[in-house]
Amino acid sequence: MPIAINGSGTVTGISVGGLPDGIVDTDMIAANAVTAPKRGPGAILQVVTATTTSSASTSSSSFVDTNITANITPSATSSKILVIIDAPFHVHRSNGTTNSMEVKVLRDGGDITDTITSQGTHQSGIGSGSISSNRSVGVLNKIILDSPSSTSSLTYKLQMGGGFSGNTITFQDGSKSHITLMEVAG
């Protein structure tokens, strides 16, 4: 069939593969024309970020919320969720004990990490605030790739607690914490 340019500006007679390489650029692709099979696995489908400055503190051995939380609704059950947390904290210990804390990341109330324990008697000094022999200051950074197999709304959060022996841990004490959730195509 011969190629014809019609009066309406349309072209007929071109077969699949009939255009030379490089003739179709990004501007010519319709919005939402790149479907999941064309993106392939590993593509970032959506990003959700939440921040908080709301202080949370505990001396309990039970786990409690740190106020670091975000929600995401995956578009496919094959998607993975990349969880990225950065959160300033400080631990104040009682005399005769070591500085220690335990944290864990949860999805819809269930653990997706083993309990993360950090303890020691040394001082660290990230950020502002006074540091003494009974106080540790730092920033918790955690990256987790979760496979929820769900298309329902999911809530991810960070909790603190567990075996403090008189220690008090505080998150967001005048600082800001972030949690970022990225849906990754499966």
Image (cartoon, helix red, strand yellow):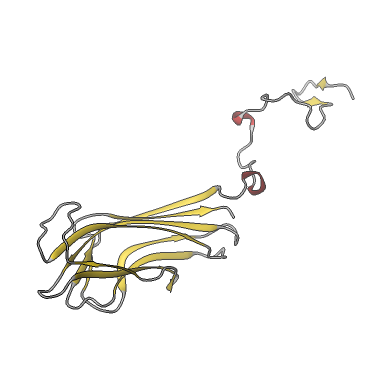
Q: Could you tell whether 65 is left or right of 72 in the image?
A: left
Query: Which quadrant does the N terminus fall into?
Result: top right
Percent position (x, y) of residue 27?
A: 60, 29
x, y (%) of residue 23? 68, 24
The residue under the point 20% across, 52% down is 126
Q: Vertical placement of 16 versus 158: above or below?
A: above
Using residue 65 as the reference point, say whether residue 5 is left or right of it. right
Q: Residue at x 84, y 21 (%)?
A: 3
Q: Quadrant of residue 91?
A: bottom left
Residue at 48% from the left image edge and 65% from the top image edge: 154
Q: Is residue 26 left or right of residue 102?
A: right
Residue at far right of view: 1
- Residue 102: percent from left, percent from top: 29, 70
Q: Is residue 110 above or below residue 46?
A: below
Asked whether 149 or 116 is in front, the reply is 116
What residue appears at the point 15 percent right and 71 percent down from the top-left corner?
Answer: 93
Quadrant position of residue 53:
bottom left
Q: Position of residue 94 (x, y in %)?
A: 12, 74
Find residue 25 and report its image quarter. Answer: top right
Task: Identify whether 10 is placed above or below 78.
Answer: above
Q: Is residue 4 left or right of residue 180?
A: right
Q: Quadrant of the C terminus?
A: bottom right
Q: Is residue 149 above or below residue 33?
A: below
Looking at the image, how many numbered discs can be counted on the residues?
A: 0
> Of residues 17 and 122, which is closer to you in this image?
122
